[in-house]
Image (cartoon, rainbow, N blue to C red):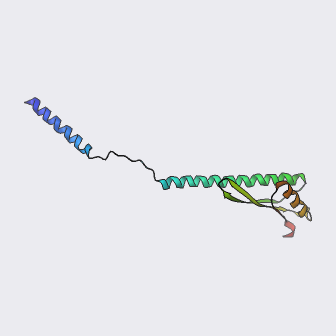
Amino acid sequence: MDRIIKIVLSGFLICAVIMPLKNIDWNFEFSLEDGHINADVSDAENIVEEQTLTLARHKIEMLALQVLEKKSVIPQKIEVFTDKESVTSISIITIEVTVGAECLGREQEIKDILEKELAVDVTVINAERT
């Protein structure tokens, strides 16, 4: 008799444990919010694009500076204006070079040299005339 009670209690305990497990939805779906991931990717892409534009501007400024140094012209400021047309294309719109009094009257010569070497529209501004 003792053995029958143990079997019945064991069966009851097994049913008590298994029945709640039966009601669990076993179809787990792990989905991350696409909006959150896309926002992070978009932020990263924007940072990379901005860094690429900054690097491109800096490289063009350095090239312009090298060309001007060969002609003994020390600019006060070189500013590169760019436009990002697509994911893989950066357009250089114009380069603006500011020179000092030592270059008074040489603006057109400087403009022609830079346009020939860099193949970009150049504006030369003399700081003494502004």
74, above or below 21, in the image: below
Tell me which residue sits at (85%, 54%) in the image: 117
- Which quadrant, please, contains the N terminus? top left
Residue 92: x, y in percent? 75, 58
Give the total of numbered labels: 0
Q: Can residue 50 be seen from the camera position used here?
A: yes
Tell me which residue sits at (68%, 52%) in the image: 52
Tell me which residue sits at (14%, 36%) in the image: 9
Residue 83 or residue 74, whichever sits in front: 83
Tell me which residue sits at (75%, 53%) in the image: 58
- Horizontal relation, residue 84 to residue 126: left or right: left
Residue 36: x, y in percent? 49, 54
- Horizontal relation, residue 39 to residue 9: left or right: right
- Horizontal relation, residue 51 to residue 79: left or right: left
21, above or below 52, in the image: above
Residue 40 or residue 91, whichever sits in front: 91
Residue 51: x, y in percent? 67, 53
Q: Can residue 74 be seen from the camera position used here?
A: no
Residue 124: x, y in percent? 84, 63
Kindly indicate the quadrant of the structure image that contains residue 100. Answer: bottom right
- Residue ranking furthest to the right: 105
- Which quadrant, please, contains the C terminus? bottom right
